[in-house]
Amino acid sequence: MKAHQKQITVHAQHAESAPVIYLPVVIGDGTEVYERCRELNCPPFTLVGIGSLNWNRELSPWGCDGTVRDAEPFGGQASGFLDELLNWIIPEAESSLPQPPTWRGIAGYSLAGLFALWSLWQTDAFSRAASASGSLWFPDFVDRASTAPFAGNPQAVYLSLGKKETKTPNRMMRHVLDDTRAMEALLVARGIPTTLELNPGNHFAQTDLRMARGIHWILTH
């Protein structure tokens, strides 16, 4: 299915009402993540993969320089993508389901993990979020989040990071563990059930499995 120019893929194998998780993906259509979820014996749910995104532009909440010299800058157009998600993608995806969802969650890896968390401050459409190896180093994100109210009442948040992700010469990314721990503390202080899982490897290790573990957690907590 297509909503605007995005590629939308609905993964569902059940006939009754169940949660729906929305997953922006940089490559593929979410099939690999859904398969890992099934291997982890996730409860019944629907996964909606969203592809054909301009990653740096549409998943960044505000503009800033790229991570290295001459890299593409971050375009800061997450608000536009969120509007498209709420007004076009969600209605189209859920119109294909036999029953309305019991609740909605949002999940993402890397910059999509940042977007998933940021969305909790922008809309009450999602009650749970999973951010796997999320780009929480993004300039000013944690500071702004710490002083802003949520749009709704999040019920659970999953965070993860690779243990080697701080071992980088990149000045923007090297403090990602501190930023992720700060986000965990912020969420816990606001009474939201939250976990932070540290995984072996760097940012690119077992990405589908890491994302599936996050989805499993928010489905079961």
Image (spheres, grey):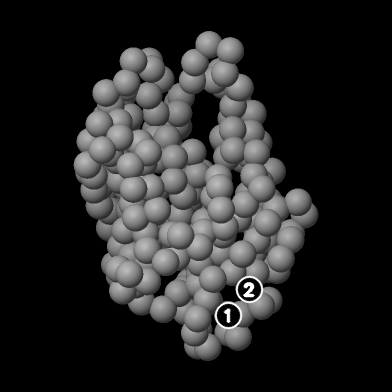
Disc 1 element: loop
**What amino acid type should be assigned to the residue bearing mark 2?**
Glu
Q: Where is 153 relative to 197, above or below?
A: below
Give the image location of residue 96, x and y in percent.
66, 78
Q: First in sequence, mark 1 or 2: give its number.
A: 2
Q: Do the numbered discs 1 and 2 sit on residues whose CB atoms are within 8 Å?
A: yes
The image quadrant that residue 64 belongs to is: top right
Q: Which mark is residue 192?
A: none
Q: Where is 184 relative to 216, above or below?
A: above
Disc 2 element: helix
The residue positioned 71% from the left and 65% from the top of the image is 1
Camera-nearest residue between 173 and 180: 173
Give the image location of residue 148, x and y in percent.
46, 39
The residue positioned 30% from the left and 35% from the top of the image is 202
**What amino acid type should be assigned to the residue bearing mark 1?**
Pro
The residue positioned 54% from the left and 71% from the top of the image is 11
Disc 2 marks which residue? 94
Disc 1 marks which residue? 100
